Image (spheres, grey):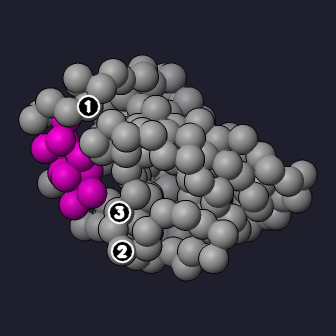
């Protein structure tokens, strides 16, 4: 397992670097992706980004087995979604408030307003282009993880923040 870092670790606030196809396809990066997936599940996460394990590169994982995907979504729910160099754009002005937490901000929760419908462009773990729509909770998780790649934590956007023991 990889070590998840927590605030106030300064590298969580850094913008991550894009990676090229050669770096992505290297044995080291492919092994790192598998370790990142295992770490996410070990800590009961539904998503994780490379900066959370002190690697400031633009890779994040969405654990799709824990997310209900609607019929408009064109990615498989049978496997983990690896997003490399992801970019999202809103496809609707509709936003919702919902409670979020984060593996790097332990025992802290707050309400964050996010777009309900987005379009995502990224590379998959094999360097192939991905273009798909994401809706509702799935869209929320992607926006949360891409924020990590941009050095933004959910507490930067949250209201009604509270802690549990």
Q: Position of residue 153 (x, y in %)?
A: 58, 42
Of all residues, the one furthest to the left in this rendering is: 27
Q: Earlier in the sequence, mark 2 or mark 1?
A: 1
The structure residue drawn at horizontal position 28% and vertical position 42%, both measured from the top left corner, is: 126
**Disc 1 target residue:** 24
Query: Front-most of 43 and 91?
Result: 91
Magenta residues, as a range? 29-39
**Disc 2 target residue:** 78
* 160 left or right of 68 in image: right
Query: Front-most of 76 and 23?
Result: 76
* 91 left or right of 67 in image: right
Position above or below: 109 against 124 = below
* 9 left or right of 92 in image: left
How far is mark 2 from mark 1, CA to CA? 22 Å
Mark 2, other Cα within 10 Å: few <14 / some 14–19 / many ≥20: few
Magenta span main SS: helix
* 139 left or right of 66 in image: right
Q: Position of residue 50 (x, y in %)?
A: 35, 39
Callout 3: helix, strand or loop? Answer: loop
């Amino acid at each position: 397992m990889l070590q998840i870092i927590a605030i106030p670790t300064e590298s969580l606030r850094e913008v991550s670097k894009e990676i090229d196809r050669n770096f992505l396809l290297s044995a080291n990066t492919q092994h790192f992706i598998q370790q990142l997936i295992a770490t996410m599940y070990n800590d009961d996460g539904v998503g994780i980004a490379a900066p959370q394990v002190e690697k400031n590169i633009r890779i994040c994982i969405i654990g799709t087995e824990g997310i209900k995907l609607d019929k408009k979504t064109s990615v498989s729910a049978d496997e983990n979604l690896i997003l490399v160099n992801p970019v999202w754009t809103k496809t609707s002005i509709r936003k919702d408030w919902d409670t979020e937490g984060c593996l790097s901000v332990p025992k802290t929760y707050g309400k964050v307003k996010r777009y309900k419908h987005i379009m995502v462009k990224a590379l998959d773990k094999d360097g192939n282009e991905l273009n798909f729509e994401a809706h509702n909770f799935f869209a929320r998780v992607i926006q949360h993880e891409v924020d990590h790649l941009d050095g933004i934590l959910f507490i930067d956007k949250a209201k009604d923040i509270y802690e549990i023991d």
